[in-house]
Amino acid sequence: MTQAEGVDAERSDVRNDVRNDERYDAQRVESKWFERWKQNAALYAAEPHSTKKKYYVLEMLPYPSGALHMGHVRNYSIGDALARYMWMNGYNVLHPMGWDSFGLPAENAAIQNNTPPRLWTLGNIANMKAQMKRLGFAYDWSREVTTCLPDYYRWNQWFFLKLFEQGLAYRKKSRVNWCPKCATVLANEQVVGGCCWRHEDTVVEQRELEQWFVRTTKYADELLCGLDKLEGWPEKVRTMQRNWIGRSEGTLVDFKLEGASGPAGSTISVFTTRVDTIYGATSVQLAPEHPIVKDLAGANADLRTKVDQLIAEQRKAKEAGDIGEIEKHGVATGRYAVNPFNGEKVPIWVANYILMDYGTGAIMSVPAHDERDYEFAKKYGLEIRLVVVPLASDPEETVAEPALPFVTHDGMLINSGPYSGMTCDDAIKKMSEHAEQKKFGKATVTYRLKDWGISRQRYWGTPIPMLYCEKDGIVPVPEKDLPVILPDKVDITLTGGSPLGKVPEFVNATCPKCGGPARRETDTMDTFVDSSWYFYRYTDAHNDHAPFDGKVAQYWFPIDQYIGGVEHAILHLIYSRFWTKFMRDLGMITNDEPADRLFTQGMVIKDGAKMSKSLGNVVSPDEMVARYGADAARLYSLFAAPPDRDLDWQDTGIEGIHRFLGRVYRFMVRNTCVATSLVASSAPSLASVREAGSAATPLQPAARAIQRKLHQTIKRVSDDFQGRWHFNTCISAIMELVNVLYASEEAIAQGAVPKPFLSDVERDLVLLLAPFAPYLAHELWEMIGEKSNLLKAPWPKYDAVLAKEEEIEIPVQVNGKLRGRVVVSADATEETVLERALADEKVRAAIACKQVVKKIYVTGKLLNIVVK
RNA sequence: GCCGGGAUGGCGAAAUUGGCAGACGCAGCGGACUUAAAAUCCGCAGGUCCGAAAGGACUGUGGGGGUUCGAUUCCCCCUCCCGGCACCA
């Protein structure tokens, strides 16, 4: 904190006026408490055995990129305020932090700076941990998790063995996404609009590779259904996950290939959600990459060339991200398939709008009832046969020909053999049953969600604990031999293939089955494996025998409140839901979902754009802390906007917050009341406030105004923590309270505010500030003579009676227009209000010479007089 | 194209159940303190128009319509911005 000292020194020579001791020196106060908190490692530790109710509040762990950014500060300020609030409400709070510390940037930095990834990463962690501590975040550091260390990643390996045992990890050669910049494979979830999620301008290529996959699709249905029960999750995230999983109910139907040549007796299986329209199918369309296309083309060189063109075109469009906009076209193969429902021969085409990676890569084309098929059929003059018509309300009525294509479920079949006359929904059911009976198809469900490819051809990740033996094939590393340690001295500058493949000591191993030579798997795991279960490790972070103890996890899980950025809506948040279900089925845990409630905070932007180095609009937390203090940085990040919305950072805004903190401090310095009664006993303040406000010794108006405002403020802040989380309005409520205190300073000086009462007010004010500005709150807590631990001091309670206004102002409208206001007592009757209103000059003017039609009085809110 | 979210002063925003639009803060202006400035404290402040002023009139929550005594809030249509999905058969 050399910067901080610099600013401090600069200021010291300014401190020569009379009000020196009233000036709030954030650096002095914050460094004092920073040092004190440093001495007490167990300050924020969760209690392992407790009769209190538990509360697990978690913020997404950061990637240790080097330094915290404002997005982190915002994220952690929200979580920290909540954690502190829950502590003050008597909960046993678990509030841990860790490091998602495997991943590509470490390798890139290593190449650039010639530093080993491990050192670079650990150095960053040390720096960011120091930043977090300086910001005053209350983490239980005894549970810190660092995913790149063997005591963590060994459990990734252990889980991998379990996945393998369960048949949930398997090896498959397939077409995969390849980012040339990352020089590695990406999961589907990591491809954004055809580009790499980390390199937004780098087009992802397709490569044929043998890879490890995790069978996420096993839980596709549960992942989808479970979303309905996650009521504490934002609808947005649930929708995104639903879209991603992309469940679609339909029917598989086999079309027999017609003709002697080609694979004899082979069939083309098509997937359709509208089997009811199958009598209108006038062609079969294949994806250019469909395996049967090669066989169909056979020696037809012309066809092969055309198909190759379609393939190239599709790939290009996919990479450019505009598949969906390319013009539909295709080529007839000259071959035919037989519609199993009516025995009709239909031509087989290959078309650029059919995707190999959805459904079966083949469709039946029904031009009359599908927009795409219609467009295609029009272009190539294929037959368009109407088989569904609108439901006629009157059977005698002649049904008008619907406009084509007629795409609706709400219809009746015609020209469909035995199914004519059925509704679409009935027909789908009956026809699927028929197909299954006759064994040429069945009702089925397809998903957009694919299995998770987790192999990465990179160094800085968890080694996949597998061996390849010439004799025994794929052999898992025995559990007792874990962890497979990631070697330190690896030349990662070499390109081509996995870096670990160039380390003979690593690659060469012994087969545990036959004792012969074996080759180690050299790919590492996707880092999303690390973050899929880290929050369980927090509950039992030093367990040497298992990832965690199930009993301990059961106490803490599910996470009560998870807080992070929405950018993880389908990556991390779907993988970790999968992992929870997998662990549950292993018998390790009993919860179905990892987190009960999820909160996604908005981005921190500046000048209307996301902060980025290239735009030069980055605000450094270190600089803010040095200039205004941690409290100001935190408070501002909560005050500037509601937490779920984007926050537009304004440098002058944080200055205002800094001023506010100084204002609180100055008031307290000038008016501190150390009420002897309260120092001796830490009796709850409510009782004495009540007493002070009781009829026996009525408070004078100034004191009563303070009391009223205080209780209104406690209510607003408490309600918001329970409900909407609009900390911006909580903080403005506290500001209003402070404004009232300032307005009462004269009355205080004149002794019109009883000391014990004021002392209680000050105490509650400090309590209200504690979740948001812990440094200042602790300083003031000490200043007012409190000896107890503020972190766990009971949260103040509000009294509805004391919060109530005695006098209220009722706006008076005439025909909905504001014409005047009357001040009445809070319990005034409608008659009184009306009487006063009619006495008001302006109101009288507005209703003069007119007839009063109606009077609407909303108790305590408004009076509207309707005239004609 | 589909699904979300959003649009309110010069700026960030508030209005929790249909009831005073603009709380709180920033920037601005004025005053007090000061030799002066900073800091601090107090006050003013949506817009337009009338008025010397006090004050008053009209208007105003992206645009248009509707329901209502009353709409930032509910309904219908439209524009723009942000995010997600997208030839998904």
Image (tube, helix red, strand yellow):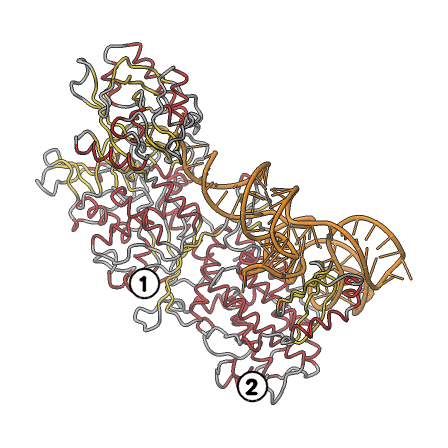
Q: Residue furthest bottom?
A: A696
Could you say which disc has been placed on residue A7 in the image? none
**A462 up-or-down from A277: above or below:** below
**A20 up-or-down from A425: above or below:** below
**A630 up-or-down from A116: above or below:** below
Q: What SS does tag 1 mark?
A: helix
The amino acid sitting under disc 1 is Trp
Residue A629 visible in this rendered orientation of the protein: no
What is the spatial separation of the Cα atoms under label 2 and label 1, in whole angstroms?
Answer: 41 Å
Q: Quadrant of the C terminus of chain A?
A: bottom right
The amino acid sitting under disc 2 is Glu
Q: What SS does tag 2 mark?
A: helix
Numbered disc 1: what chain? A
Residue at x-position 75% and y-position 69%:
A838
Q: Nearer the viewer, residue A345 or B31?
A: A345
| Callouts 2 and 1 in the same chain | yes
- Whether residue A608 sits left or right of residue A418 in the image: it is right
- Whether residue A511 sits left or right of residue A38 in the image: it is left
Q: Nearer the viewer, residue A612 or B18?
A: B18
Of the two numbered discs 2 and 1 on the same chain, state the one appearing first in sequence.
1
Could you say which disc has been placed on residue A556 in the image? 1
Counting from the top left corner in percent of width and height, residue A186 is at 34, 36
Counting from the top left corner in percent of width and height, residue A628 is at 59, 59
- Whether residue A147 sits left or right of residue A851 in the image: it is left
Q: Which residue is mark 2?
A: A691
Numbered disc 2: what chain? A
